[in-house]
Amino acid sequence: MKNLIKIKLAFPVLFLAVFMFSCDDGKLNVFTVDEDIQLGREVTEEIFANPQEYPILSEAEYPEAYQHIRRIRDQVLNSGAQSGQLRYKDRFDWDVYIIDKDVLNAFALPGGNTFYYTGLIKYLEDEASFAGVMAHEFAHSDRRHSTNRMTKIYGYQVVLSMLLGNNPSLAATIAADLALGLQALAFSRDDEYEADEYAVKYLYPSTLDARGVAYFFEQMELEEGADWMVYFSTHPHPSDRIEKIYEHHQGLGGKEGERYAARYQQFKNSLP
Ligand SMILES: [Zn+2]
């Protein structure tokens, strides 16, 4: 009896799965773009439901901090759209959140929502560096790295749980994985290189210096210690990433940009 149910279930699942596959730059993805957005919203809810792990900075108490981060967000989105490289500017949510924790990291969800730890914001020295990290995270969402990767990791199980309406449990699993250091969702090296490359492309039309991610790595390379290691538990070592970022920037014409250290200091001052 159990087997019969399995067979009956398996057929429509496989049938639907074929139609749900979308080809994302040659990468197989069982999620549609709308499902990326839906999943991102559900994981965002899970994150808000777990303030011990994710103490989201209160916007009511720190409105200025959110004004700064949204100003930078809009700058990255507009510049990305102008570059013609950011595909989902008008479709994804692109909500930005600050997590009040001394952690040197940031992360992106499917559908465009991104989270930045106060530890990272305070560590960086100028707006170009922060915008670089933000553009890198935006690239993970816009290039759909999470759901490409989940297609690889979970495969048909994801499709099955989605068809059975178990999305919240998937969102909870992802939120828990994030708390464990993104283990299940750790991006591949190729994803990281691609996110670095697109960060430069998105930022290039803006007045900002487009090499911000490289400046972040350079700053970390000058130091050694635990902070450094946290970031690289979820991101590849910067050894040749800096060089590649400079190459992409040269390839676009090598235009110098602003780093906006004074303006960024105001953002840092607005944090607790
Ligand atoms: Zn990354």
Image (cartoon, grey):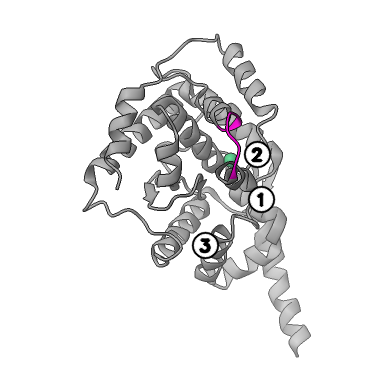
Q: x, y (%) of residue 61? A: 22, 52
Q: x, y (%) of residue 195? A: 59, 34
Stretch of the chain drawn in magenta: 220-225
Q: What is the residue that sits farthest to the bottom in this orientation?
A: 1
Q: Is residue 255 above or below residue 45?
A: above
Q: Earlier in the sequence, mark 3 or mark 2?
A: 3
| Residue at which label 2 appears | 191
Q: Amino acid at mark 1?
A: Arg
Q: Amino acid at mark 2?
A: Asp
Mark 3 is surrounded, within 10 Å at the Cα level, by few (under 14), some (14 to 19) or many (20 or more) other residues, namely many
Residue under the point 46% across and 63% down = 53
| Residue at which label 3 appears | 175
Do the CB atoms of the residues marked 2 and 1 lie less than 8 Å apart? yes
Q: Quadrant of residue 54?
A: bottom left
Do the CB atoms of the residues marked 3 and 2 lie less than 8 Å apart? no
Whether residue 81 sits left or right of residue 190 in the image: it is: left
In space, the residues marked 1 and 3 are separated at their CA atoms by: 15 Å
| Residue at which label 1 appears | 149
